[in-house]
Amino acid sequence: MKKILAIVLALAFVLGCFAACGKTESGTATDNSLQNVLDAGKIVIATSPDFPPFENLNDDGTITGIEVDIMNRICTKLGVDLEIDQYDFDAILTGLDAGKYDLAVSGITATEERKENALFTDAYCLSAISLVVPEGSEIKTKDDITDKTISCQNGTTAELYCNSNNLKNSAFAANADAQMALTTGKVDVWAIDKLTALDMVAAYNDEHEDKLVVLEEPLTYEPYAFASKLGNNALIEAINGALAELIADGTVKSLFDSYGAEYVDPSVDPTV
Ligand code: ARG
């Protein structure tokens, strides 16, 4: 009997150790996020490459853009490779928990609401949402859109803005389709992040007789950051360290410059 008790106690001790080993002091599971990336020798990112100049799918199948360039530099600093996986935008943040990728990199606005379900890096730039209209449209400012129809991308902050302001909107999985809804007259206005609007509108206007215009006044201002699964603090801290160096030494700004995109520091208050 004594022997059985001793075995049970020993077993309990071993199990207790395992449980303790799997926990940090705060009682949450061990954070292997950085070690896993280092062991794998790569960071796997999820992106929706329909968002120039941040990530764009080229005709030859490669994905290029400002965020790809920033991530390549972060990976160099961490001594790992970059793997890019493609998803629809609205699946990226919701898919973080499944663990198929380490990081969501997709022109993602770090909102307070999203921070409840994902762990964000520090912001690396300030962006805005703009309105795009056909040339000659009667829509001149955001005050003119209350009774208009709007196109946007599924799961984006543009869609959230429309929904929370009770605006009539059609959301599309791909940005190109949101743009096409405007150019084919199915909607009156297209809501899309400013730098992407400028890029896609310039490309469209180059090839078409009918022209599009990006309205001057933005709908909102939004900081962009990368996101990982809640609990992946070690990975996010390492990325923050690399990102801070790339911002401080001017690399991030020079990458924006190389795409002809205006860089706005995330600490700027655009309203003053
Ligand atoms: N910044 C917006 C958001 O976070 C839109 C991002 C769209 N990104 C993309 N790769 N299509 O909701």
Image: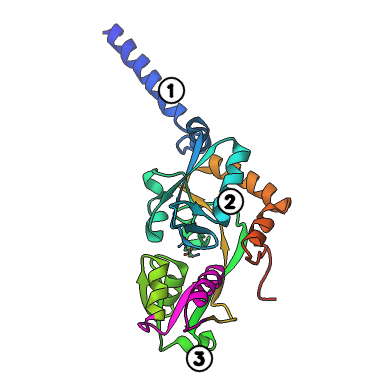
Secondary structure, mark 1, is helix
Identify the residue at horizontal 41%, vertical 60% (top origin): 89
Question: Is 70 located above or below residue 42 in the figure?
Answer: below
Q: Which numbered disc flags the more N-terminal residue, 2 or 1?
A: 1
Establish whether ligand 1 lies closer than 8 Å to the Cβ of label 2. no
Tell me the residue that label 3 is attached to. 136
- For label 2, the crowd category at 10 Å Cα-Cα, with few meaning under 14, some 14 to 19 and many 20 or more, is some
Question: Is 20 located above or below residue 53 in the figure?
Answer: above
Question: Is 16 located above or below residue 100 in the figure?
Answer: above
Tell me the residue that label 1 is attached to. 17
Question: Is 251 located above or below residue 6 in the figure?
Answer: below
Q: Position of residue 87 (x, y in %)?
A: 39, 54
Task: Specify whether residue 38 is in view.
Answer: yes
Identify the residue at horizontal 47%, vertical 83% (top origin): 209
Which residue type carries mark 3? Gly
Number of the front mark, 1 or 3: 3
In space, the residues marked 3 and 2 are separated at their CA atoms by 37 Å
Between 95 and 261, the one nearer to me in the picture? 261
Tell me the residue that label 2 is attached to. 69
**Magenta segment range?**
184-212
Q: Is residue 26 magenta?
A: no
Q: Name the image quarter holding the N terminus.
A: top left
Question: Contact (CB < 8 A) between labels 3 and 2?
Answer: no
Between 184 and 28, the one nearer to me in the picture? 184
Question: Contact (CB < 8 A) between labels 1 and 3?
Answer: no
Q: Position of residue 136 (x, y in %)?
A: 50, 91
Task: Specify whether residue 31 is in view.
Answer: no
Furthest residue in direction left, as rendered: 1
Q: Is residue 201 magenta?
A: yes
